[in-house]
Image (tube, rainbow, N blue to C red):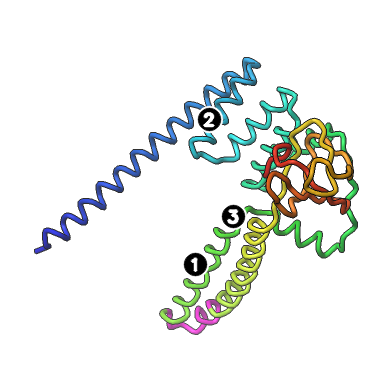
Amino acid sequence: MFSNNYISFISILIFLSILFFFTDNVFASNADSLMQNGNQYYQKKEYRKAIDLYQKILDEGYVGTAVYYNLGNAYYREGKIGYAILNYERALKISPGNNNVKYNLAFVNSKTIDKINTLPSFFLFDWWQSLLALFAVSGWVYIAYFFYICLLISIGLYFFVKRPKFQRYSFFAGIISTFFLITTITLLTVKYNQEMNIKNGIIVESAVTVKQSPDPTSNDAFVIHEGLKVRIEESVDNWFEIRLKDGKVGWMPKKDLQII
């Protein structure tokens, strides 16, 4: 017989599981309702109302490619190129292979004022970055998990199937799975470190005068415009130190930039 404490513990676990399932479904239903209403406002060309509803979805904790994509579309229709690019970039961060997001992002980027020439880089570095960009962190996790399962299956077949032919196949399958598992874990680690340590942002003000130091009275360095993507190097009080793709560095107010 089970003790009363054990039965109480199991009852609590069941209750919490049901509660989590119920609240999760209620939240998903609410997010779907907000998305549908936002889409209706978008179709009616009431873009400001659509933006408010899409933003409400994000404020409630739901993060997804579709809501960022729709938000980007609505901001573009409102004439806010910076916020449109910001949300397309956020959508692409979740789904790097989404062709609709890529197309819209490229289209809106063509409308920006600043055309920054990228510093030349070694072709192997470009290839490596393209490989990393194939999937988000979650995507690389799933791939690593897949090869891990393949490795476990190969090991199981090798030890439990006592036929030399199958053992030979499972041995080579294990080697291949190990190679791809190590490669994927390496890519996952690099991708995760990039996500944690490299911060990019989008200029959301029409024009920003970048300073040589984090002081409004310091000398002007250069001027950048809405929609430009920059790398954030450092943060001091209400200032970001930014770096452009051509290597220029300067300081700008935090309020004029949104982190992707």
Give the residue type at disc 1: Ile
Furthest toward the left, the residue is 1
| Residue 61 place in picture, x, y as percent | 49, 39
The disc label shown at residue 149, or none: 1
Mark sitting earlier along the chain (2/3): 2
Dominant secondary structure of the residues highlighted in magenta in the image: helix
- Horizontal side of residue 64 vs 31, given as left or right: right
Kind of residue at disc 2: Lys
Residue 166 located within the stretch drawn in magenta: yes
Q: Which mark sits nearer the N-terminus, 1 or 2?
A: 2
Tell me the distance, in whole angstroms, between the alpha carbons under discs 1 and 3: 16 Å
Label 1 residue SS? helix
Mark number for residue 139?
Answer: 3
For disc 2, the neighbor class at 10 Å (few under 14, some 14 to 19, many from 20) is: some
Give the quadrant of residue 239.
top right
Of 102 and 114, which appears nearest the observer?
114
Quadrant assignment, res 28: top left
Residue 9 relative to residue 149: left or right: left
**Part of the protein shown in magenta:** 161-170
Compare residues 124 and 52 and report the one nearer the observer: 52
Q: Which amino acid does the dot numbered 3 rest on?
A: Gly
Which quarter of the picture shows residue 120?
A: bottom right
Q: Residues within 10 Å of mark 3 (few under 14, many from 20)?
A: some
Q: Earlier in the sequence, mark 1 or mark 3?
A: 3
Q: Nearer the viewer, mark 1 or mark 3?
A: 3
Residue 56: image tag: 2
